[in-house]
Image (cartoon, rainbow, N blue to C red):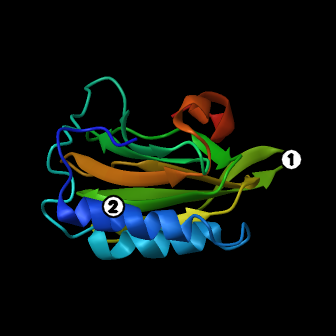
Amino acid sequence: MTRGVGRSAAFSAMLGGITAAARAPETSRHLAVAEALAPFLAADDLLAGFPCPCSPDRYVRHLLHENAAEGWAMVAIAWAPGQASPVHGHRTWCAVGIYRGWLEERYFGLESGLPSLAARHPRAVGATSSGPADITLVHQLANVSDGPALSLHVYGVAFDRFGDGVNHVYAAA
């Protein structure tokens, strides 16, 4: 199921690539999906027909596509300046690509079960990142720029399971 008024040719092609990549072996699926996202992140019309506004209160997930039969969904996350995800690990595989603006990805170690900042990496348009299902691989995404950002995220669960199936939260934003 795809949301939005219409799909661009780029969006349809991207979905085809993601669908094939999401059938890769579980151990490499996140990498295959990130690779499938990458060529489309610079397509200006990729999200034509998909309004993905920011909220002044928090980042917002916009459902773009769900393949419930194969157990994955794709969302666009709209980030206003200063917004960040909670510090979290993932209960499912995940692939992310930056479509507009840029984000900072922060990685954390777990000292006595508590997250401790280990590294910061800027992620500009076209950058991808991914990870397997592993709650001990802890990170956070943040818009530290002065403009809005939009990232595409593909998770290995159906959209109705995002609440309990995606993030293992260690600390609020």
| Residue at the spot 86% in from the left edge and 47% down from the top edge | 112
| Residue at the spot 35% in from the left edge and 56% down from the top edge | 103
| Residue at the spot 62% in from the left edge and 32% down from the top edge | 161
Image x and y of residue 2, in percent: 34, 43
CA gap between label 1 and label 2 equals 32 Å
> According to the image, label 2 marks what residue?
98
Three-letter code, disc 2:
Ile
Per the image, label 2 sits on a secondary structure element best described as: strand
Tell me the quadrant of the picture where the N terminus can be found: top left
> Which label number is shown at residue 112?
1
Seen in the image, is 50 located left or right of residue 36?
left
Examine the rendered structure and indicate whether residue 16 appears above or below residue 114: below
Seen in the image, is 165 located left or right of residue 149?
right
Given residues 3 and 89, the one toward you in this image is 3
Q: Nearer the viewer, mark 1 or mark 2?
A: 2
| Residue 10 visible in rendering | yes
